[in-house]
Image (tube, rainbow, N blue to C red):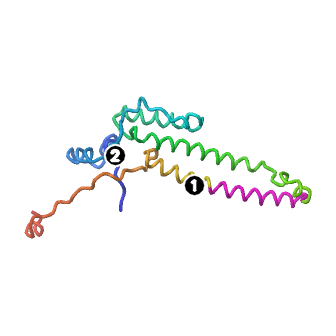
């Protein structure tokens, strides 16, 4: 299957490492799908992002990077991607919240939350029971954290926020077919 190609603007910004010809560059520019406006100056975060401090901070950071790229002539996202970016920022905030919640579980006395259980368990048994209850909660949170992480990776790929993000809509080079058997045999 192979790797997917980068957007042509990003490819050119990297110095045209595969030495595409002007005709190939022009063909890729014409074939790339473009939706929305590339002018991001008037784009504001949705209200649900602005209300979440972590999500809004992430929004501002990512938008600054996109605007810097646009000033260099690299069109990474358009106004049609704003909602996806908002989802990414809120998912990022939820991910950090889950990680913080996992950290705080170590300080919870689960046995102390149930008076009957607390009175029946003393010393080492109480500590063992706390560990078991804590482990159940940690495993539950780990599952949620892993799911959020997978979503973040997919959104980062879509929004070109990681170095390995590629585009699938770049046409492949067409191989020229020989006109007849003699040309094929002698490579004329």
Q: Is 71 one of the magenta-colored residues?
A: no
Q: Residue at coordinates 57% horizontally, 51% vertically from top-left?
A: 148
Nearer the observer, 101 or 23: 101
Q: Residue at coordinates 83% horizontally, 51% vertically from top-left?
A: 113
Q: Is residue 168 left or right of residue 85?
A: left
- For the residues labelled 1 and 2, say whether their Cβ atoms are less than 8 Å apart: no
Distance of label 1 from label 2 (alpha carbons): 28 Å
Label 2: which secondary element = loop
Q: Which quarter of the picture shows residue 34?
A: top left
- Dot 1 or dot 2: first in sequence order is 2
Across and down, in percent, residue 61 comes to: 50, 35
Q: Is residue 56 left or right of residue 125?
A: left
Q: Is residue 30 above or below residue 144?
A: above
* Image depth: mark 1 or mark 2 in front: 1
Please identify the residue farthest to the front as the structure is shown. 47
Q: Is residue 55 above or below residue 2?
A: above
Q: Is residue 67 above or below residue 31?
A: above
Across and down, in percent, residue 143 comes to: 62, 57
Please identify the residue farthest to the top as the structure is shown. 42
Q: Which residues are magenta?
A: 121-143
Nearer the observer, 111 or 70: 111
Read off the residue under disc 1.
147
Across and down, in percent, residue 173 comes to: 24, 56
Q: Is residue 58 left or right of residue 137?
A: left
Q: Residue at coordinates 25% horizontally, 45% vertically from top-left?
A: 30
The quarter of the rendered structure image containing the C terminus is bottom left
């Amino acid at each position: 299957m192979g790797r997917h190609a980068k957007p042509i603007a990003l490819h050119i910004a990297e110095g045209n490492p595969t030495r595409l010809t002007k005709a190939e560059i022009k063909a890729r520019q014409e074939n790339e799908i473009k939706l929305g406006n590339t002018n991001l100056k008037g784009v504001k975060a949705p209200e649900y992002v602005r209300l979440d401090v972590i999500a809004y901070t992430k929004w501002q950071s990512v938008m600054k990077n996109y605007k810097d790229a646009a000033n260099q002539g690299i069109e990474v996202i358009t106004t049609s991607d704003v909602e996806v970016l908002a989802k990414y920022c809120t998912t990022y905030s939820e991910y950090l919240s889950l990680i913080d919640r996992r950290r705080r579980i170590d300080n919870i006395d689960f046995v102390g939350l149930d008076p009957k259980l607390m009175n029946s368990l003393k010393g080492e048994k109480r500590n063992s029971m706390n560990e078991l209850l804590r482990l159940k909660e940690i495993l539950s949170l780990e599952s949620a954290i892993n799911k959020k992480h997978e979503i973040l990776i997919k959104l980062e790929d879509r929004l070109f926020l990681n170095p390995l993000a590629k585009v699938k809509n770049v046409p492949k080079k067409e191989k020229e077919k020989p006109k007849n058997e003699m040309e094929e045999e002698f490579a004329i």
